[in-house]
Amino acid sequence: MFVTKKKRQRVHIRIGQPVRDVPTAGGIDWRCPISITGLPKRTAPQGYGVDSLQALIHALKLVEVEIGALARNTRGRFEWLGELWHGLPVISVSLPPNVRSGRAARPAHTRRRASVKRGTT
């Protein structure tokens, strides 16, 4: 249920089964269809991934972001079973430590070799 000062409206969020049909340079990737109805603006984003699980996780995160933005922009809120919550799992995305620190490993063939300065004594 989406609640604003003026009204309460039922919202339906549907996340479809992942489908492998997205052509990419590396082969065929996955998408997970999403439908959000009952709001003034109907949205139908899709989650994408290299496998079905990644597409599903991306879809769940997209829904969380979409409805969070709607709540902030309209000063409304979502309720689920009488509680202030949207009823979806909260997805926390974290990066591997080497990416967070900015020291992502580069392939060996692209690394620079350390130059050794030879001095005269």
Image (cartoon, helix red, strand yellow):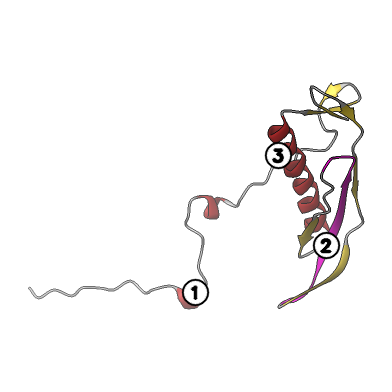
Task: Point out the tag, 3 or 1, that comes first from the N-terminus.
Answer: 3
Residue 75, position in %: x, y? 71, 28
Q: Which mark is residue 108?
A: 1
Report, in whole angstroms, how far the alpha carbon at label 3 lies from the one at label 2: 22 Å
Q: Which residue is mark 3?
A: 69
- Nearer-the-camera pick, 46 or 54: 46
Q: Which mark is residue 50?
A: none
Is residue 58 highlighted in magenta? no
- Nearer-the-camera pick, 98 or 79: 79
Q: Residue farthest to the left? A: 121
> What residue sits 75% from the left and 44% below the top?
66
Image quadrant in which you'd find residue 47:
bottom right
Looking at the image, residue 45 lies above or below residue 66: below
- Nearer-the-camera pick, 118 or 101: 101
- Badge 1: few (under 14), some or many (20 or more) residues near its Cα, within 10 Å? few
Query: The residue under label 2 is which amino acid type?
Result: Arg
Which element carries disc 1, helix, strand or loop?
helix
Task: Point out the tag, 2 or 1, that comes first from the N-terminus.
Answer: 2
Q: Quick check: marks 2 and 1 in contact, CB under 8 Å?
A: no
Residue 23, position in %: x, y? 79, 75
Q: Quick check: marks 3 and 1 in contact, CB under 8 Å?
A: no
> What residue sits 75% from the left and 46% below the top?
61
> What residue sits 67% from the left and 46% below the top?
93
Q: Which residues are magenta?
A: 26-40
Which element carries disc 3, helix, strand or loop?
helix
Q: Which residue is mark 2?
A: 31
Residue 40, position in %: x, y? 83, 41
Dot in front, 3 or 1: 3
